Image (tube, helix red, strand yellow):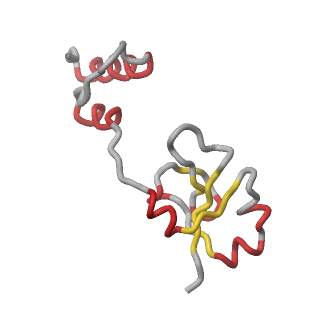
Amino acid sequence: MPKQFYILSLKNTRGEHVTWWGPHSSGYTCDIDHAGIYGEDEIKEKPSYFDNGESTKAVPIELVQQCSRRVVSTDHLSLLCGERVYQWEDGPETETLRQRRAARENENGVRGT
């Protein structure tokens, strides 16, 4: 069976989350479940496009599966649950999270804890 790859977007990856190409060379995603899968022949046809080492890197699916893990974002879960599901260890909430929490509280007509 021919090898299959995900395409890592080096230019769009920031911080700890990797950015992958979507299916059919369209769009980007940090969710490996939504990443495109590319065949070895396709990559060999256009290595400067799919695996140039500057903005793209073809990574074998097996390697990605070995180092991937499923995580749940506390920020998203808090929005879905309608309440904060985490506590701050040090310092105040970031401005973005304060704004999101205030917007949610406005929508729900409740005051957060």
Task: Name the residue nearer the viewer: 26 or 74.
Answer: 74
Picture quarter with the C terminus: top left
**Apparent side of residue 81 relative to residue 4 in the rendered image (left or right):** left
Q: Position of residue 96 (x, y in %)?
A: 44, 21
> Which residue is at a point 63% across and 57% down the rendered structure image?
26
> Hey, which residue is sitting farthest bottom in the picture?
1
Q: How many marks?
A: 0
Residue 59 vertical position relative to residue 101 in the rendered view, above or below: below
Q: Quadrant of residue 25?
A: bottom right
> Which residue is at a point 46% across and 52% down the rendered structure image?
31
Residue 29 vertical position relative to residue 78 in the rendered view, above or below: below
> Which residue is at a point 57% across and 49% down the rendered structure image?
19
Q: Position of residue 68 (x, y in %)?
A: 43, 56
Q: Position of residue 30 (x, y in %)?
A: 50, 49
**Apparent side of residue 27 relative to residue 30 in the rendered image (left or right):** right
Residue 54 vertical position relative to residue 42 in the rendered view, above or below: above
Picture quarter with the N terminus: bottom right
**Apparent side of residue 10 relative to residue 17 in the rendered image (left or right):** right
Residue 105 vertical position relative to residue 71 in the rendered view, above or below: above
Q: Quadrant of residue 78?
A: top left
**Apparent side of residue 83 relative to residue 41 in the rendered image (left or right):** left
Q: Position of residue 87 (x, y in %)?
A: 25, 24
